[in-house]
Image: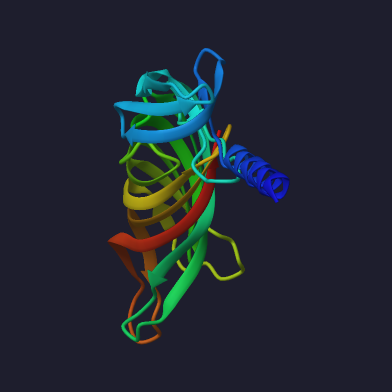
Amino acid sequence: MRSIIITGCILILNLSLAFSQSTKSKVILKNGVMMKGEIVEFVQDEYLIIRVMEGQDMRIPANYIRSFKIKEGKMSIYNLPEKGYFNYTKGGFLFTKANEFDVVNVNMSVHTINGYRHNEFYSAGLGFGLDRYGSTSAFPVYLSLNRDFFASRVTPVFNGNIGYSWMWEIDDGWEEFDDVNGGLYWELGLGLRINYKKTALIFNYAYKRQNSELTMTEDLWWRAENTVTENHKFRNMTLTVGMEF
């Protein structure tokens, strides 16, 4: 009986050890050192305390940490964005109200931004792209400013763009305008950033405005031709998804 109890205790102890090892955390420091143990305390942007296998608690400053486990039983390694060059390329849709009957046109938008990240929160870059507004297209060039709210794997993000766009009419067999000129371009957006080991996936929803000057000729049979120039503002909501490298 005694041997059975001892055997059972050993079995339970082995199962406990196996389970505890399967849920151990892993912390990788910026100098490449890897530590395994149990994360017992984490204060955002300040420090992390890990209980290593020897039973000792080690306090690690946040700026020493490159990545760490965030899911029990499964390793989910990610890197916070680091200081230096980045490229962010995104694509999606522009939603524009077409007329007073609440008809919404859906057009395409593709952009890329190359810039410099100051730290895990702030970055700035120079961007350009291609936007479609019905029968016209725009090529915006702009300054982009971005702000991540938290230093974590998943964080809300804010972005703002301002610049100038060149515009032209698409030759689809029915030219509506005699001349198309671009103008001021700006955009304000909110999104969600998911950091991975070497990249980040970013979903973004934004309000975009594009100023333009449209010239057209009215040729009506009951009166002489009349040239009209309109200062038009394209107002759009955009939904995009992109990757940062």
Would you identify the image quadrant in which residue 49 lies? Answer: top left
The answer to which image quadrant residue 36 occupies is: top right
Image vertical order of residue 2 relative to residue 134, above or below: above
Q: Is residue 17 left or right of residue 242?
A: right
> Along the line of sight, which residue is nearer the eye, 200 or 151?
151
* Residue 109 visible in the snapshot: no
Indicate left or right for 5 with 101 as reference: right
Q: Residue at x 58, y 34 (%)?
A: 197
Residue 89: tell me if it is visible: yes
What count of labels does the image hold? 0
Taking the image as shown, residue 153 lies to the left or right of residue 78, namely left
Rendering coords of residue 236 (x, y %): 36, 63
Q: Position of residue 218 (x, y in %)?
A: 37, 74
The figure's colour scheme reads rainbow
Q: Residue at x 54, y 25 (%)?
A: 53
Q: Residue furthest front?
A: 1
| Image quadrant occupied by the C terminus | top right
Q: Nearer the viewer, residue 154 or 233?
A: 154
The answer to whether residue 238 is above or below residue 9 is: below
Is residue 174 shown above or below 204? below
Q: Nearer the viewer, residue 71 or 36?
A: 36
Residue at image location 60% in from the left, 44% down from the top? 16
Task: Return the x and y of residue 216 as percentages of the image width and height.
Answer: 38, 65
Q: Residue furthest top?
A: 31
In x, y percent, where is residue 120? 38, 29
Residue drawn at the location 57% of the way across and 42% of the way down: 23
